[in-house]
Amino acid sequence: MSHVKVELKPEQVTKIKEICKSFNNNPGELINVLHQTQGAFGYLPAEVQEVVAAELGIPVAKVYGVVTFYSFFTMLPKGKHPISVCTGTACYVRGAEKVLDEFKRILEVKVGESTPDGKFSLNCLRCVGACGLAPVVLVGDKVYGRVSPDGVKDILNEYAD
Amino acid sequence: METVKLTIDNKQIEVPKGTTIYKAAKGMGIDIPVLCYMDLHDLGVENKPAGCRICVVEVEGRRNLAPSCSTACMEGMVVKTHTPRVINARRTVMELILSDHPKDCLTCPKSGHCDLQDMAVRLGIRNIPGQEYAEMSTYKKDFSPAIIRDVDKCIMCRRCETMCNQVQTVGALSAVNRGFTAVVAPAFEQDLEKSPCTFCGQCVAVCPTGALTEVDHTAKVIRAIADPTKTVLVQTAPAVRAALGEEFGMKPGTLVTGKMAAALRKIGFDYVFDTDFAADLTIMEEGTELLDRLTRHLNGDKSVKLPILTSCCPAWVNFFEHSFTDMLDVPSSAKSPQQMFGSIAKSYFADKLGKKRDELVVVSVMPCLAKKYECQRDEFKVDGNPDVDYSISTRELAHLIKEFNINFAELPDEDFDRPLGESTGAAVIFGATGGVIEAAVRTAYEVQTGKKLEKIDFTELRGMEGIRTATIDFNGLPINIGIAHGLGNARKLLEQVRSGKANFHAIEVMACPGGCIGGGGQPLHHGDSSIIKARMEAIYREDAGKEIRKSHENPYIQQLYEEFLGKPMSETAHHLLHTHYFNRKKDVYIK
C-alpha cells in the first residue's frame, strides 16, 4: 500500500490516545479504534498507526496488517472531491472499467491516490444500489448515472472552481 | 477426564475430549500429511491456522472435508483419511499452492530441506495444471545482514508469524494485504532491517520453504582460504558440535566435536580454534562484573544495577536495545564470546604471529543468524576491519564440508589448536539454556567464597521450562538467579524486573527456545522439538566428560591474563572485551 509522510501535531496524538482510551486500550478493539481514528483524520497514515500500536500495546505490523486487510481503511488522504467509480457487477458489465481508465488518464492518478493539488481522489466501490443507472460514479455525495468515458471530462468540469 | 469414542480408518479409538483428529490419528500410527501445522510440543508452541488444507479428512455425515489439524474428535465420529475424495482434494490443494510457487527448486537454497518439496513428492504431484497461464504473485526481495526474505516462495503457513509474535513477542512480521497480494511482512512493508527484527532466525528455523533463508557467507570463506596473503582462523560455537552430525544423517544428540575439528582442518583453515575458549573468557569478565556489582550492592552502593543480565546472545541484545531502552545499563557490558574471540584473535594472537590485523581473517561457525548481524556492527570494527569477518551457520558449515569432498562420518577425531582452542566444560554448556549462568556460578562461587565447589553440576539451573528461577547458596549468601529462553519469556522476566516485582541478582537470557542448540542457524528440526532435547543432553554429556569444568581453571585463559590482559576488567580487558548498547527503537519506520 502506498503512503504519505505526515508529522502529527501534539493535539492529534492526544486525539488518537483519547480514542484508544475510550476502548480501554484493549487490543481486541483494534478495528473499532481504527474506524474512529479514520473518522477523525480521514485516513490512517503510518504515523497514526504507530501511535495506535503503542497505545494498544501491539506490534505496528499487526495494525498495518489489519489496515491493509480491510478495504474500508485507507492510508491515503481523500481529495476535496472524492470520486468513487462503482465496479460492481452491473456497472462493470456496462463499461465501468473504461470510465475508470478515463478518470485515471485525465487525473494522472492510480486508484486510491489523490491529485497532487489534493482536489480529487479516485477510488472504486462495489454497488451503491443504483444498478439501473449503471455505470455509476459518485463525486462526494452526488451520484452520476449512465456515465460514458466521454462524459468523464464534463463531470470533472463541474468542479473546475 | 472426559473422553470420546470414534472410528478412524475402521479402527475404534478413545481419546480425551478436545483432541484433534490429526493427533488422535497420530496416536494410532496414522500419519496424516500436514504443511502449515506445526507442533513444537516441548516448547509449548503450536501453529494451526488451518490454512493450507493439506490435512483434510472425510468425516461421515459432514458435507465438506475437515481439516484434521484443527477439528476436534466428536463422539461416534467416523473418519477416513485416505479415500479417493481425500486424496484428490489433497492433490488439488497442493497443485493450487504450487501454481503460485516459483519452480526454481534446483537452485533454491532450501532444496533438499524443503517441506513443500517433500510434500509434492509424498503426494505424487507430477503436473501443475494451468501453470502456463496461471498468474504468479511477485514481491520485492528483502536482504538484511542476516536473513533473506523471498516472499514469492511464501505459502502463508504463518509459522514465522507464530514464532515472531507468540513465542518471541518481537512483532516484526505480520500477514498484510489480502487475497492474492497477501504476504507476511514487517509494518508498512519495510525491510527487516527497519523493523524491530532481532535476527534471532526462529522464523527461518520453521519456514517450510525457501521464503526465509540465511545470508550465505560460504563463498567469501572459500575465497579467504584460497588467498595466500591471509591467515584464516575459525572458531566454532558450543552448540554446533551437538547438531552438525544431523546434517550427515547422524542421530540427533550425536557429538561430533573431534570430527568437526578434523573437517575444518581439511577445509584448510590455518588455525582451528574454539569459541568455547572465548566463552571461558566471557565467564572471567562477566563473572567478575557480577561479583563487582554484588559487592558494591552489599556495601550499600545505591547506584549499582542489579540484576546483571547476560549479554552473550546477539538477538537478545537487539531485543533489549529495541524494547527495553530504559534499561540499557543493566546488562553486562561483556561482549559475546564470538566478539571476544575476534577481538583477542586480532590483537593478542596477531601479535604472537607477528601479523597485522588485516592479514588475519576470522570466521565463526555459529548456530545463529543474529551473529551475522552482530559481527558487522560498527562498534566491533577497528578502522573498518571487523573483529570477526564472516559468520556462517551450522548449516553452511555442513555445505562447506560436502563441497570440499569430505567424508564426514569417516573422519578421525582431532583436537583444536592452541592457545585459543582450549576450553572447559563450563564453556560447552553455553550452548544450552541455563548454561551461561551455571558456568558463571561455578567460577563466581569459588572466587567469592574462596572455597572449592563440592558439586559442579547445578541441575536446578537446567531444563526446558521457559522461565526458571533458583537460589544458590554462596556460603551463606543467597544468590537469586533467573533464566529465560525465548524472547517472550525474557520479556516477561524483564517486565517483572522493571516493575520491581522480581528480586534477582543475575538473569540469563537466550533468545532461542532451548538456547543456542535451538538456534536459527542449526540443522532444521522440521517441527520435531525432541531434536532440541537430544542436543541439550549432548551438551551436558560433553561437559561431564571434560577434565576441566570451571572457566577460571583453563590454563590458556590464565596465560592470556598473565601475558596480556592483566586481570579481569582491567583497562585492556575493558577496551577489548566490553561494549556498550544503543537505543535502536525507531518510532517512525517510514523515512
Image (cartoon, rainbow, N blue to C red):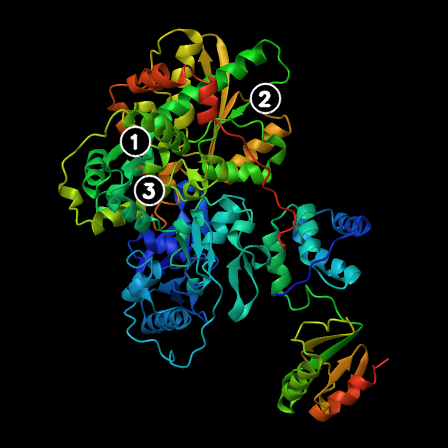
Q: Earlier in the sequence, mark 2 or mark 1?
A: 1
Give me the residue at 78% from left, 79% from top. A139
Camera-nearest label, 3 or 2: 2
B68 lies left or right of B505: left
Q: Residue furthest right?
A: A161
Q: Chain of mark 2?
A: B
Q: Quadrant of the C terminus of chain B?
A: bottom right
The residue where tag 2 is placed is: B305
Neighbourhood count class around disc 1 (C-alpha, 10 Å): few under 14, some 14–19, many 20 upward: many
Q: Are marks 2 and 1 in contact (CB under 8 Å)?
A: no
Q: Earlier in the sequence, mark 3 or mark 1?
A: 1
Give me the residue at 42% from left, 18% from top. B441
The residue where tag 3 is placed is: B530
The residue where tag 1 is placed is: B274
Spatial CA span between label 3 and label 1: 27 Å
Asked whether B442 or B87 is in front, the reply is B442
